Image: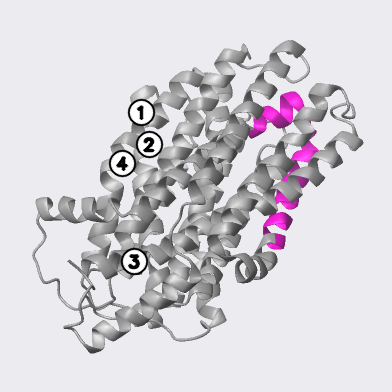
Amino acid sequence: MSVVAVPAIQGKLPRRLVFFHGLGSVAYGVKDNGFSTFLLLYCNQVLGMDARLVSLALMVALVIDGVIDPLVGYLSDRTVTNWGKRLPWLYLAPVPLGIVWSVLWSQTVAPGFWGLVGLAVAVRVLVSCCEVPSVALVPELTRDYDERTTLMRYRYLFGWGGGLFIAFLAYAWFLRGGMLSPSGYRNFGICGAVMMVVAVLVSALAQHRYVAVRPPPNKNPFRLGTAFAELRECFSHRAFLILLVGGGLAYASQGITFSMSNYLYLFIWRFTPGDLTVYPVVLFLSVVACFFLMPGWHSRWGKRDTAVVTAVLGMVFWVIPFLLRAAGWWPTEGTPASTWGIFAFFFVCNIFSVAAMISASSMMADVVEASEEQTGRRAEGVFFAGNFFMQKCATGLGIFVTGQLIALSGLPDKARPGAVDPAVVDRLAMTYVGVVTVLAVLIAMVLRHFPITRADHEARLAALAAARINPDAEGMHP
């Protein structure tokens, strides 16, 4: 039976630890918001790159990153220092990440296809080196079914908060003179870089006394063949595969929505600069509402059923305004009635959408013990690296799909709101609605097959505890 580097904390986690653990996800939120919401618009409308070329470059970057991500998790699991497994990664990665992030948004001319690929790969790999070791601490810090959700709630609160805060600054300050300002995007990049570096380093320092425990030495030396064999064993776990597929569909939908968002807000809903400043605040308030609602939902329905129901409800509230608009029953776009109506629907939608994401992430932590029961090894880093890679691939796929939808709709490069053929805008809107509706239904259909419930998890913890006392107990691993 394997030994974990960080002793699990029994009962309620210290709130200080939970707070600063969650703070580390700000870096991922800033990256995700930049890549999903602004990067396609920046490269397409500011630097003049073809939308399809940009989306393809980001997809190629993800393929390259795909080989690296699981190895980051595997190497994180095998890191042995006096500061534990995860902290060395969290101390070394953020500064290079901040530098590369700033360079990405400071381009004066289009970097070209391979230049964009290189910058995207560098950002994604360095984000992995920050996020994977950080989130891998969740199943190490606690075995409790509900406390894992608590950690994930704080991670999502800070992740969304960081991403929406930088979006707020972009709309209210950096891009207040227009969405196509090169200097605005440069300042956006510099501010995001500072936020990333500070958040990861402060989070790591605040957790140091809890997690700086030297792990036992690895029984077997690192070999690439063994690494891939163990990765394959982890990735073949049924519960993990269900989460990968369901999560992949969810993050593809989110990737499409985020990368399409500025097009939706500008060309369909005719948001003003003031509306774009208010909107991130509305979304953050919805995340706060979800933060407080989640414990009751999980206590009553469990993680799986909460994820299934909220995935569908989030889609329903998101598409209603688009359907009412298509039927001619929505107020004129750009008026206060239209804008505040959108805010209301999207507020409710985002509560449910974030709840589905938090539930699925907390479910991933419970896969760790299910795998340990079968293999005798804990592989927190591997599982969360696989989950993280899925998120990036699916988000990248979403961005790629958005590029195709924009091109197929006939929306011209450097288009101006109000100067585009209404038929083009309608075609873009309804095609988008059809795609996200189908994805939401598929998400619910997949996640309902997740096999781990609260009772399963607690029984498994008891069996693993008994096996540690009696190593000769049968059935713990092949």
- 262 drawn magenta: yes
Q: Residue at x 50, y 31 (%)?
A: 399
> What span is in magenta?
261-289
> Label 1 near label 3: C-beta < 8 Å?
no
- Distance, label 2 to label 1, CA atoms, is 6 Å
Q: How far apart are the two marked residues, 1 and 4, measured between alpha carbons?
A: 18 Å
Is the residue under label 4 in contact with that under label 2 (CB below 8 Å)? no
Q: Amino acid at mark 4?
A: Gly
Camera-nearest residue between 101 and 153: 153
Compared to residue 95, the image places residue 212 above or below, namely below
- Can you tell which mark lies on residue 115? 1
* Of labels 2 and 4, the one closer to you: 4
Q: Earlier in the sequence, mark 2 or mark 3?
A: 2
Horizontal arrangement in the rendering, residue 57 relative to residue 455 (left or right):
left
Q: Which residue is mark 3?
A: 370
Mark 3 packing: few (<14 Cα in 10 Å), some, or many (20+)? Answer: many
- Residue visible at 37% across and 57% down in the picture: 384
Dots 2, 1 in contact, CB < 8 A: yes
Q: Position of residue 48 (x, y in %)?
A: 53, 18
